[in-house]
Every structure is written in structure tokens, then in C-alpha cells.
Amino acid sequence: MIAFVSGPVAAVSPGSAVIEVGGVGMLVHCSPATLAELRIGQPARLATSLVVREDSLTLYGFADDDERQTFELLQTASGIGPKVAQAMLAVHSPETLRVAVARGDAKTLTAVPGIGPKGAQKLLIELKDRLGAPTGGVPAQPRALAAARRPGPSSCTRPWSASASPRARRRRQWPRSPPRPSSRSSPMSPPCCGAPCGPATAPADRPGRQAG
């Protein structure tokens, strides 16, 4: 059994990584969360589990020994192979799985692709005495949703909503200026006679009329 591999990361693909060990590239199948922590050219250490089949030798890698042990325990249930076990660890952390089994929470297990309600109930029965009791740590949120969930700005702590238009934000931020007084409401303005208003001009002398 290969317990772990350690060395520089030679390559990273969507479902696996290549770790250089003593001049030999070891292909290790990992979950997306584990692959996200690897950087090409940087040293890495992965706990591993070797799955032996008649026609293949497949090496699975994990971030720590707890994930590897949970991966191997999950496969003791009927109908759970290495791919389904890895999919379960890609969605939930080992502690989340232990809590779900201890509480009989089938809904948590059905969040894994490929596991239906009947399969989840069957897993709860078979893994109840195998997966172990929760360690007491706070279960992590589903890994598939952890990257998507980010705390957004609260509308209670901002003077305006982030979805408001720039014009609306300016209107809410700056107080409106008082209305200008109308010329008609001014006590100094003479009453309007109804005739069209225009610039005041001096009356012109009528033609043909001479001063007396």
C-alpha cells in the first residue's frame, strides 16, 4: 500500500494531478477541493489509497489521513466503489458525513450525485457502526457550495441598496435643495394684467404729431 506521495507537482488536470516522486510521475486522482490547493512546481504531500483491480492500479489522493480513512471506510458499504466514495468526499467533509450518519440524516447523503433516497437509507444502516462517531468539530458546509456562498453587503449598514441606479443613489445620498420662490408668490411682484409680458420700452411718438 502507498500511504502518501510527496514531491513537486508536475501537472494538474480536472480530475487528477501528477506528483514527481524520485524522478517518477505518480498519477493521483483527487477531488476538486484537493486539486484547488495544488500549484505546479510547488511541493505537495498527499495521503493516498491504492485501489487494485484486475486490469488497473488506481491511486487516489487526499488532503489528509482523515479523508483517506473515510474514503476506505465508505467502500465497505455495499454498492459504494472508489468513484462514489470520492464523490461523497468531494461534496462533504469527513466530519459532515460522520454527523449525518450519526443523526440518520438521509437528506445530506442525497446531495451526493448518484445517491438516491433509498440508497441513502441503506448507507445509514450499513455505515452506522463503521464510520465512527463525530469528533465534536463543527461540520463544514458542503464543499460544492462553499465557493459560491460569500457574505454580501447588508442593506441595513449601507445608505442605499447596491441594486439602485446611480441617479437613485444620488437622490438618496444628497438632500434636495429647497424650492425656489416663484415670481407670482413674491409680495413685490405687481398683479398680472393678462396682457403678454415683454421688455418694457418707452412709448414712441405717433407719426404726424408735433409737440405743442
Image (tube, rainbow, N blue to C red):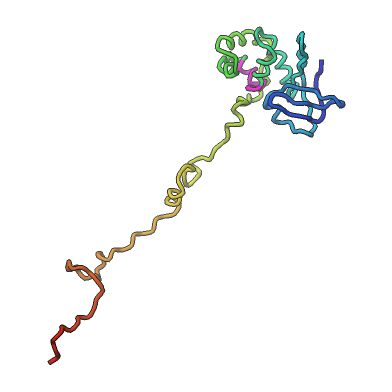
Question: Which residue appears at 15% of the width and 83% of the height?
Answer: 206
Q: Is residue 54 above or below residue 212?
A: above
Q: Which residues are magenta?
A: 90-100
Whole-percent x, y for residue 108 in the image: 58, 18
Q: Main secondary structure of the magenta part?
A: helix
Whole-percent x, y for residue 154 in the image: 51, 40
Residue 202 versus residue 5: which sits nearer the camera?
202
Whole-percent x, y for residue 139 in the image: 63, 24
Task: Assign the N terminus to one quadrant of the image.
Answer: top right
Whole-percent x, y for residue 195 in the image: 18, 68
Q: Is residue 46 above or below residue 166?
A: above
Q: Is residue 63 above or below residue 196?
A: above
Picture quadrant where residue 52 is located: top right
20 displayed left or right of 173: right
Question: Which residue appears at 77% of the width and 26% of the height?
Answer: 18
Name the residue furthest right. Answer: 22
Picture quadrant where residue 70 is located: top right
Give the total of numbered labels. 0
Residue 103 versus residue 145: which sits nearer the camera?
145
Residue 199 versus residue 140: which sits nearer the camera?
199
